[in-house]
Image (spheres, helix red, strand yellow):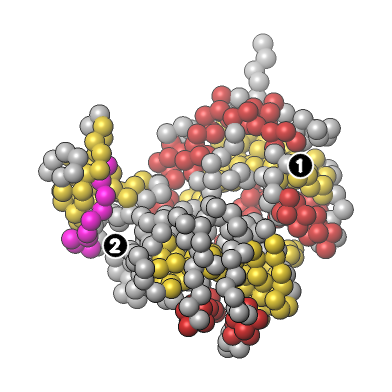
Amino acid sequence: MKKGQIYEGTVEKVKFPNKAVVVCEDGTAVVKNAIPGQRICFAVSKNRNGKAEGRLLAVIEKSPLERVPDICPQFGICGGCLYQSVPYEEQLKIKEAQVRELLETVCEPHYEGLLGSPITEGYRNKMEYTFGDEYKDGPLTLGLHKRGSFHDIVLADACHIVTEDYRKILRATQVHFAERNVPFYHTYTHEGYLRHLVVRRAAKTQQLLVNLVTSSQEPEGLDLTAWASCVRSLELSDNLVGILHTTNDSLSDVVQADAMEVLWGEASITEELLGLRFHISPFSFFQTNSYGAEVLYAKAREFVGETKDKVIFDLYSGTGTIAQMLAPVAKKVIGVEIVEEAVEAARENALANGLANCDFIAGDVLKVLDTVEEKPDLIVLDPPRDGIHPKALAKILAYGVKRMVYISCKPTSLVRDLEMIQAAGYEVKRSAGVDMFVNTGNLETICLLEKKEEITT
């Protein structure tokens, strides 16, 4: 295969998360964002040491798996969903095979399969929409990034993975600012005003929080209370509890707060998981599928097992969800999280849930572990997508606890970390997947790791 040449082939399988293996007369190539069984046209972007990579140009023939008739009109254009045209039971089979194959490269996984999400539409409880244009110098658009583009924005007013309330808020906001010719923030020139619209939802309590993120370059005469009134006037199924305005002058596209004001209502929502209540602030981490999170945490609690009178370390603890689910019969739970806002939320949530044996520390796991005097009996790991820094992992393994539970949102990072964990004398006793991200290529993986018994002579 030659770089720049166009080929046709059939997708044999898809490796995690979206790497389709395409077989054609001239060889095999990896092409992102295709579905098993599709016949596609692709252009070779590189070919090194006989390993070709290509860019998807068109789907010539649909896969036999594509049997879902009612799909989003932006499917394949927006960078979100990958498997929306495939029935959910087939999506689970694809993802289960991906994880099993990955784990088997490093261990005997004792894999117990992939647990599905209890709901498959309207499951996302947080969306970060971006203001921009669909093409250069086009009209104001509010939605999601176009697949393969950092700048083009696709209108997401028919998105299936959120509820109709999200779509109503998005449409009303886009129309409101378009009619007033309010400019969006350009990442190249760093000029403009509108940046993001963030909508959060508590599925169990049916509460909504809306947050408009802008630069400080406010147009003269603009009144954001008029936008807030527009949102409040919508007929929504859920209970709108707060409308916020966040100022962000960061040069990068990340959503963060230099300043925040409450335009109306409250600054947080409350969610319920497995009998506990959690306050969610605008920027604190929380699993994006509330019903799927219950499945994940129930499985984690099952893998953890007996916690009576034990000291538990919950590392990369976020808002302390796992810690608080393990705390009731534990001696003490210590959570470590680098995001200070999340730690503050964890402390407030533990207090609200009547848990006095939780201690949450803000800081990098690598540094914080040097300051903690207690020694753990059990460790739970839930790191970010890139996994655990090798130096931090070495300190974790040095405790030599009998059991660890590792929750991963990126199984390729888990597989890399498992090599170091197994070299330290641990073995995978149980593993499972949980599909938190229906229609997309992502999923959660969980492993129970136990220290091998030392043989004495």
| Image position of 377 (left or right of 354) | left
- Residue 92 appears in the rendering: no
- 57 drawn magenta: yes
Q: Quadrant of the N terminus?
A: top left
| Image position of 259 (left or right of 428) | right
Tell me where residue 290 appears, x and y as whole percent: 61, 64
Which image quadrant is residue 21 in? top left
Mark toward the start of the polypeptide (1 vs 2)? 2
Tell me where residue 330 appears, x and y as whole percent: 81, 47
Q: What amino acid is at disc 1?
A: Ile
Q: What amino acid is at disc 2?
A: Leu
Q: Which residue does the image show at 26% across and 32% down from the upper left?
A: 48
Helix, strand or loop status at disc 2: loop
The residue stretch that appears in magenta: 53-62
Q: Which residue does the image show at 46% across and 32% down from the upper left?
A: 106
Residue furthest left in the image: 25
Q: Nearer the viewer, residue 171 or 223?
A: 223
The vertical placement of 426 against 137, above or below, is above
Tell me where residue 37 appears, x and y as whole percent: 24, 56
Q: Nearer the viewer, residue 2 or 256?
A: 256
| Image position of 286 (left or right of 33) | right
Q: Which residue is mark 2?
A: 65
Residue furthest front in the image: 220
- Residue 279 appears in the rendering: yes
| Image position of 116 (left or right of 44) | right
Which image quadrant is residue 40 in? bottom left
Q: Which residue does the image show at 63% across and 50% down from the upper left?
A: 300
Helix, strand or loop status at disc 1: strand
Residue 312, label in figure: 1
- 220 drawn magenta: no
Asked if the residues shown at circle 1 and circle 2 are in contact, with their CB atoms under 8 angstroms apart, the answer is no
